[in-house]
Image (cartoon, helix red, strand yellow):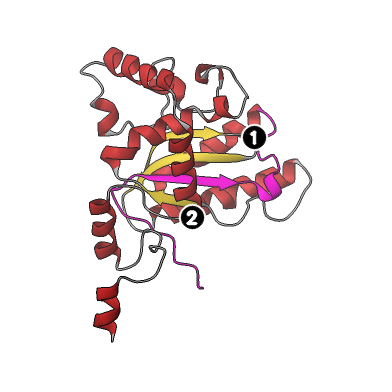
Amino acid sequence: MARLPRLVVPHQPHHVIQRGVDRQVIFHDTADHLFFLACLRDAARRFQVAIHAYVLMPNHLHLLVTPADQTGLARMMQWIGRHYVPHFNQKYHRSGTLWQGRYRTAVLDAERYLMLCSRYIDLNPVRAGLVAHAGEYPWSSYQHHVGIKSDALVTDHALYWALGNTPFEREAAYKRLIEEGLDEQEVRMLSEATLKGWALGSDQFKNGLEKQAKRRVQPSRRGRPARDVLVKAL
């Protein structure tokens, strides 16, 4: 079966995962992280992609983004690859690709899943056992979201602003959400949707996307067709 083209919807949030080839390390030291973040910041501005949350893990990365148009996300990721990968290869005396195939993405129903995805991303280092608390990890958007430091890379989404009327209220509310954590079902749902390229949202949201994109955005239902569908087909 032919692979469906990647689904990108302007002005909708997307969860993005990019992995290192064979799960190899893609960030070895502080300089690697800083160089990648500089590439990401420049590319996001160049191609009009808002970055709402991010985390750079040793062998993969997550982004929560909203592209302004149909091509901006792909162009941003390609631009990063053209700048970060040659830099990484030259520094570590290697050649060839750094990424495990193409990046994966899922379009999100913002009202239901944007803040959930932001928490999923900021808690990734904790789930991986790299730190005991999200605030201890320097390469994510968590410190920005709770007011420890301002991060020029991050564009706060309107739903983050809705957490409170003042920066203090928003930061405290986000911290409480992080402390609540995520259950395994939520983690699995976000991961699977992104890795398989399916939209994540209500049935109404996904049906609307299918009409807009003129393609499937969710898995086909399993099982035999209903009897009335078979009758119509005959």
Q: Is residue 5 magenta?
A: yes
Q: Position of residue 39 (x, y in %)?
A: 52, 41
User: Which is more N-terminal, label 1 or label 2?
Assistant: 1
Residue range in magenta is 1-29
Specify the farthest residue to the front: 227
Residue 37 visible from this viewpoint: yes
Mark 1 secondary-structure assignment: loop
| Amino acid tagged 2 | Lys
**Looking at the figure, which quarter contains the C terminus?**
bottom left
Q: Position of residue 218 (x, y in %)?
A: 37, 58
Decide: is 174 above or below 55.
Answer: above
Q: Mark 2 near mark 1, Cβ–Cβ under 8 Å?
A: no
109 or 85, which lies in front? 109
Residue receiving disc 1: 58
At 61% from the left and 45% from the top, the residue drawn is 84
Query: What's the amino acid at mark 1?
Result: Pro
